[in-house]
Amino acid sequence: MPQANAKLNAFPVFMRVEGEAVAIVGGGEAALAKARLVGQSSAVLRIIAQTAEAELLSFIAATGAVHVAAAYEAAHLEGAAMVFAASGDEALDRRVAEDARRLCIPVNAVDRPELCDFFTPALVNRAPVAIAIGTEGAGPVLAQMLRGRIDRMLSPSLGALATLAASFRGAAERLPKGTGRRRFWRDFFAGAPARAVEAGEFARAHDAAVELLVSDAPASGHIALVGAGPGAEDLLTLRAHRLLMEADVIVHDALVPEAIVAMGRRDAERLPVGKRKRCHSKSQEEINALLVELGREGKRVVRLKSGDPLVFGRAGEEMAALRDAGIAYEVVPGVTAAFAAAADFELPLTLRGVSSSLVFTTGHDLKGNSLPDWAKLAISGATVAVYMGRSVAAEVAGRLIEAGLSPDTAVAVVENASLGNRRRFHGTLADLPSLEARADLAGPVMTIIGDAVAGANFERSEPLAAHRHEDTASATAEGVEQ
Ligand code: SAH
C-alpha cells in the first residue's frame, strides 16, 4: 500500500523543447546516452566536447546535432533550454551545473543527484504519447524494467492513433458533453478506428471514426482468433498479450493453461469451451454461434486457442461463421506445438542434406487404402509432425513402414512441450506403437518422425521402447481439433 504521506520530491512535467537548444557537456558514453534520450525529441542538440568518442561522433553526423569541439566554457550553455553535465569528470560536471544555475537553465548532472535540478526519466516513446518513468534517481534499473513492461503493453501504433485522435478533437467537441463524448472516445481508442490504425490502414481508421461520430448504434464487436502458444506463458506473442488485456470476453480451449487465461483483465468474462477428447463441452457449431452472438453484442472477444489458431484449430469454421455474420475479426499467430516440441528436443525440423520439407499432419486420415500425400512425403524424406497422434500411433507407424519407410527411422515424442512438466521420448518408428498404450502420459503429445530427428539432443529423453506393452487404457488430452 502507498503510504498516505508519501510525497514526490520530483514532480513530472513535459517540457516544450521543439526547436530549442539542449546542451550536453561530455564526449563519452554518458553524453551519448543523454544525446540518444533527448534525440527522441525535436530539440536541437548542442554537444560540447573537445574530443568525442567515435560512436558519439557518428551520432552527431547522423542526426545533425551541433558539435562544439572546444574546451568547455560557460558561454556554450547560453540560450539552452536544458543542460546535461555528462563529462564524467566530477569537477567539470560541478562547474557546468553551477554555470547553468547562474544562467537560470535547469541542469541534470549524470550520476550526481545532488547537482540535479531535474531527473531524466526512462521513456516509452509513442510520439506524441510519452510515458516517463521516474524514480528520483534512486533506481535506474527499476526504471528500465518498468519501461520494458509498459512498452510491451502498448501497441506500436499508439502514436499514430493519438495523432488521428487529435484531428478529431474539434469534431468530437460537437458531440453532447458527458456520456456521448466519452463513448465516442472509448470506441475510438478501443474499437474499429484503433484496430484499423493497428493494421496500418489509416484511411479506413478515419472512416471508422467518422462513422462513430454520426452513428447512434452501439460499437461493433470484434473477435481476435489468438494463438496462445504451446503452454508456456512467455511463449505468448506480445500482440496476443495485449489483446488479452483489452478483451471483454475470453473464449478458450481446454488446452490453454489457466495461467495464460488469467493474463486477461480481471473483470473479463471467461468462457471455457472444451474440447478434450471424449468430453466436448460445446460443439463447434455452438462455439461458432457463441462468437457471432458476442460480436453482435459489441464485445471485444479473444478466442484463445492452443498453439497457432490456424493449425488444427478449427479456425476455418469460426472465420467462415464470422464472415457470414459480418463480424470483424483478426488472426494472431502463435507458436505451434511442433515448434515447441522441436525446441525442447533441440531438433532441427529441416536439416541440410537430410530434410528440406516439413509436414504437419494428424495421421487420422490413414484409414483408407490409398496412402495420403503426407505419407509419400515422409517416405521421400520430409520431417513429419503428428498432432493428436497418440491414438493412431500404431497405425501411423504400421502404414509408413508398410509403404517403405525404414522401421529404424528416428522418432521423437514430447508430452507437454514447453512446460515445466514436459517429458521427452526417443526411439524409432518400430517403437512408436507403444505410445498408444501408455497410461502415464496425460498431457498433449507431439510426435516427430524423420531422419532429421537424429540431429536432436537425446540427453534428457527417455527411450520410447521401454514401455512397449501396457494394457491400461490411456486417458488422453488430445484435444480433437482436426
Ligand atoms: N493449434 C494447436 C494444435 C491443436 S491440436 C497448435 O498449433 O499447436 C491439439 C494437439 O496439439 C495435441 O493433441 C498435441 O498433439 C498438440 N499439442 C498442443 N500443445 C502441445 C504441447 N504443449 N505439447 C505437445 N503437444 C501439444
Image (spheres, rainbow, N blue to C red):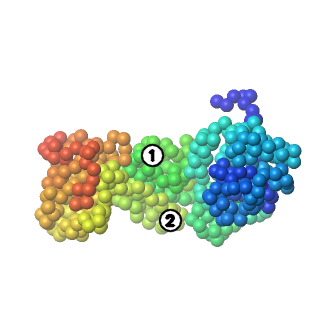
Q: Residue at x 51, y 62 (%)?
A: 329
User: SS class of the residue under badge 1?
Assistant: helix
Q: Is residue 342 above or below residue 423?
A: below
Instruction: Give the crowd class for mark 2: few <14, some 14-19, many >=20 residues within 10 Å.
Output: some
Residue 269's label in the rendered image is: none
Q: Residue at x 41, y 46 (%)?
A: 232
Relative to residue 52, is residue 262 drawn left or right? left
Task: Give the amino acid at mark 2.
Answer: Ala
Q: From the image, which quarter does the N terminus lie in?
A: top right
Instruction: Give the crowd class for mark 1: few <14, some 14-19, many >=20 residues within 10 Å.
Output: some
> Looking at the picture, how far across and down is residue 64, in whole percent?
71, 65
Q: Nearer the viewer, residue 114 or 167?
A: 114
Q: From the image, which quarter does the C terminus lie in?
A: bottom left
> Is the CB atom of the residue marked by disc 1 within 8 angstroms of ligand 1's nearest atom?
no
Q: Residue at x 16, y 63 (%)?
A: 405
Relative to residue 398, is residue 354 drawn left or right? right
Q: Is residue 64 above or below residue 294?
A: below
Q: Earlier in the sequence, mark 1 or mark 2?
A: 1
Residue 233's label in the rendered image is: 1
Q: Nearer the viewer, residue 233 or 369?
A: 233
Tell how many labels.
Answer: 2
Instruction: Choose top left, top right, bottom left or bottom right for residue 420.
Output: top left
Q: Which residue is mark 2?
A: 325
Q: Is residue 71 visible?
A: yes
